[in-house]
Amino acid sequence: MRIGVCIKQVPDTDAHPRIADSGDHIDDDDLSWVISSCDLCALEEALLLVEAVEEEEGGIDRPELVVFSLGPARVEEALRKALALGVDRAVHLEDAAFRGGDAMADGRALAAAVDREGCDLVLAGAQSDDLGQAATPAVIAGTLGRPYAWLVIAVELDAASRSVRAVRELEGGMNEVLRLELPAVLAVQAGINKPRFASLRGTLQARRKPLEKVDCAMLGVEPGQVGKAGARIETMAVRVPPTGGGGLRIAGDAAEAAAELLAHLEREALL
Amino acid sequence: MSRQEPLVWIVENVGSGPGSRETLVCAQLLGSDPRLARLDEDRLGPYSPGVFAKALGALIASGSRERKSRSTVVLLPHTYQVAEFAPRLALLLGAAYIPSISGVHRDGEGGLRFRRSILQARLEAEVRPRARTIVATVQSGAFSSDETPAPPRQVVEVCLPADMEPRPEREILGREAASAGGVDLAGAERIVTAGRGVGGADQVSVAADLAAALDAELGASRPVVDNGWLPREHQVGSSGHLVAPKLYVALGVSGSIQHLMGMSGSRVIVAVNTDPEAPIFSLAHYGIVGDLHDVAPALTGLLNERAGR
Ligand SMILES: Cc1cc2nc3c(=O)[nH]c(=O)nc-3n(C[C@H](O)[C@H](O)[C@H](O)COP(=O)(O)OP(=O)(O)OC[C@H]3O[C@@H](n4cnc5c(N)ncnc54)[C@H](O)[C@@H]3O)c2cc1C
């Protein structure tokens, strides 16, 4: 049994991104990069699944855990972090041909990579903190023709019947309970668990764990199918959305602003 | 429009919530005479992403073959179900996938440009499709019109293609209610909500104190709940409570679309946020740019003084 987790490295959303002079992307300089938050939950869930098997069967059929990420050299840091958390090995999809891809292009490349490793279960985050398209895991599933569920908030692995039980969020306060046969792809929603922090020991061990770099040729994908060439969308401009339309901005220090706000609320008979 | 209009489909998911009106308003910005494709479980069997994507994909592909020279735009409401199967639909059609659009226009050459939020609504992007077929999902609340748009003249029921196995790729074991709670948010007259900006479980009390002083219920954004700072029953938003109190005070809430879906109907909205560009301010009736750890205690102090507490 092998579990794959696909992670994306994204700009830290607490930092204020600067728009590049060209106006069509975010300035990469002085950004700090982190693992997208749902993807961290996917990693944690995979670690929990492995630990559950270890407890049950004395670690005999312990699934192997492989992490995948597509991106430039900086992505190695995210992969090392995953290794430090307890993942067994890492696959870095790094090729100039991967640059400028959209979810379709990146999903195809990642599908080839998880297929090459023979992953029985693939986990990924439900949507990334940067583009939030919620599409890459669906493309991986679609490309490989595997069962898929999005917005998963609980997973149980049943190795004996080669299936997973997954709970998926619906609108309106309902959940749906599903059974999917392996191999399958699950996109997990934030809140499914509380991601752990890496220990010092884990961080030291991570340096010696295998991290393989793979390119188009190794994955057997056509360069025209990935990256900018394979992308079906192109970002023409990014901008700060107009914040107009709001009501009254109350200025002053905290005490003044608080007093003024209360006067308004009083006038509106809200107190 | 002088250029050839695209063939526009709007997709309605029978029994799966609203959204068709907005997709119709959006469709009319793109071209005239959109076609409506209806997905119905009575016809297709129980929903699964693969089955719905394949059945709809077969219909769209045959429509596009009919009109070789035109591009095709498929518009769907951005519901959870659609967000699950629409990327697969785009993959099958070799289409451009543009999820949760909030606007559309034509560039100088008549090409389509779609607008969508990125980086948790901090920025918006303008996206150009690079394919003849476009699958786009429409963000809730993004398209409105005073006039009720004319219903599509052509309505097509989506069927399973003859060569397709109707076997769903996954089995539905059941449905269950997400954790119910004892917090009466839906009926509350006043709500004070703690966003991620409160900073930690040990600091939620700044919001709770203000809620107590205002005689309000305590709400939370999703990350506050996901991080375990408050129980799930406090959550406001598309995956939490839908609320419409007289007064809604958002402390350290950025104003994501999922949060706004749960509270935008509130009569008076107050936002306190350190970031003057936070999207919540465009909705707030009263906005204070400042640290909630200063402003909220100041409010609590004044209210308690008034009440003689
Ligand atoms: C399918 C789906 C369903 C979802 N459902 C929901 C839902 O039901 N409800 C929900 O809320 N979210 C939901 N989300 C998550 C949503 O996308 C956002 O991530 C979330 O709403 C952000 O919460 P926030 O505003 O508290 O945090 P952030 O976006 O991180 O914003 C924190 C804000 O606090 C401000 N801040 C920081 N420090 C201070 C300070 N000291 N004083 C004042 N301000 C400060 C920051 O400027 C920032 O604007 C859902 C997401 C998905 C994908």
Image (tube, helix red, strand yellow):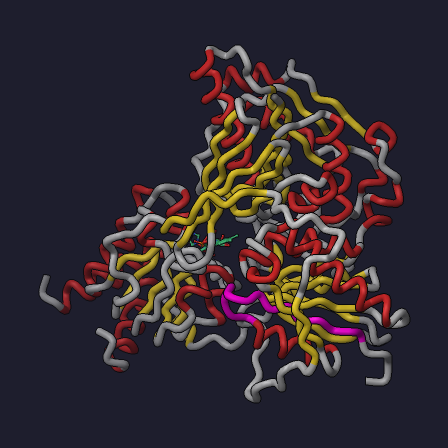
Q: Measured along the vertical axis of the image, is residue B150 above or below residue A245?
A: below
In terms of depth relative to the viewer, which is nearer, B125 or B290?
Answer: B125
In terms of depth relative to the viewer, which is nearer, B202 or B93?
Answer: B93
Residue A82 lies, in percent from the top left, at: 59, 27
In terms of depth relative to the viewer, which is nearer, B186 or A171?
Answer: A171
- Identify which residue is drawn at 82% across, 60% down: B130
- Identify which residue is drawn at 80% across, 74% down: B6
**Looking at the image, can residue A150 be seen?**
yes
The quarter of the image holding the C terminus of chain A is bottom left
Write down the quadrant of residue B52 in the picture: bottom right
Q: Residue furthest left?
A: B308
Write down the quadrant of residue B109 in the picture: bottom right
Side of B68 where B255 appears, left or right: left
In terms of depth relative to the viewer, which is nearer, A45 or B150?
Answer: B150
- Identify which residue is drawn at 71% across, 78% down: B34
The stretch in magenta equals B6-19
Q: Measured along the vertical axis of the image, is residue A13 above or below residue B31?
A: above
